Image (cartoon, grey):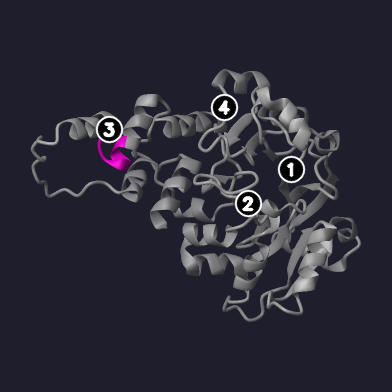
Amino acid sequence: SSSHWMLHSHVGNARAPPNTPIVTTNRSAATDLRQRLLGGSRGEAKRKRDDPQEPPPPETTQAAPTTASYMAQHTAITASELVAPHVLFLGTGSAEPSKYRGPSGILVKIPFMEDDYLLMECGEGTFGQLVRMFGYTGALDRLSKLRCVWISHRHADHISGLVELLSRRVQCTHVKEPELLVLGPKACVRWVQSLQPIVNIGRLRVEHFGAAHNSPFCRQVQRRIGASMIFTPVHHCHDSFAVSFVFGGVDRAERSPRRQFKLVYSGDTEPCEALVRDGQGADMVIHEATFEHEMVQDARAKRHSTIHEALDVARRAGAARVILTHFSQRYPKFPKLEHHELEVQTSGIGVGVAFDGFAIPLQVTELSKLTQFVREFFDS
């Protein structure tokens, strides 16, 4: 699990300390990366199959590089980056899980807070992904610091991992952890409330979006995480919402204003004018992009967005950067999108394409260059 986390956290941050060589964003570099990680090229593997009598290579005392050691050498991440505010994509696929993309789940390390987290969506296997990234103890540690869970709508690929995650949170050794706020549609509220008498899911409050603004506990959680929340009805199934978190305000310790950071998450939706309005000036938009542009009729039938539509929403909202997620499982690795299309559609906005295990700082720069590297890595 540590190697898997190392790989994806480094790809997500793509930065290195001084005097450390960095993998460049070209196809030969991506091919070199794949060869070093997996050992040998495709051509070498074919020659071995065609010529079984070929003598084995001479023994060497130097061990083959592991995923972790290779990535640590070329794109090392510092300890400060691991604790800095970031977004970690636990699942980036739509509908049922596949080999490469699991159901939706996004963990956010909250800006300006010492060690608090929030979770957006909780599809099947979300807790397992946390264990895969951080180990069992590390996963429980993050659950103990979880302050809010946001569920955008009632579909199973966004909610079916919630009971396991809440049950595991009970196993945390912290005795006096604050109550957890779960925000979701009415179907989610009724479901969780019906489970509370029969399943130990710990200390929590589950509330509907519409009632949250009048909830003293919701206001308490917003003060705790240093954020205000904007709930936006969107066009998907009944009772579907997007959310905008505006972090910042006044530093309680120094009593001075801090620069705000606005994070917008679309949930599942067709292009939505209300989201463009409420997302104005976002520092980062995370938008679903289920289909390629040629499948716009499928997108309308299922009330989802195409990649181009997601980019257009971010552009019209004046976002600084946009991360695409929730891809159809017909795109197991990288969605169908040409580099020149990114430039035309976004007019300078940083564009990222999420994959399971993708960890990225909230203040990431040169995001589009990183996206090109990720494409080359998966295509090589």
Three-letter code, disc 1: Asp
Residue placed most toward the observer, 55 or 112? 55
Secondary structure of residue under mark 4: loop
Q: Nearer the viewer, mark 2 or mark 3?
A: 3
CA gap between label 3 and label 4 equals 25 Å
Counting residues from the start of the chain, the first of labels 2 and 1 encountered is 2
Q: Which residue is mark 2?
A: 106
CA gap between label 2 and label 3 equals 34 Å
Mark 2 burial class by Cα count in 10 Å: few <14, some 14-19, many 20+: many
Three-letter code, disc 4: Lys
Residue 70's x, y, as percent? 32, 44
Badge 2 vs badge 3, beta-carbon distance below 8 Å: no
Secondary structure of residue under mark 1: loop
Q: Which residue is mark 4?
A: 336
Q: Which residue is mark 3?
A: 41
Q: Over which residues does the magenta segment extend?
A: 35-41
- Name the disc covering residue 268, or none: 1
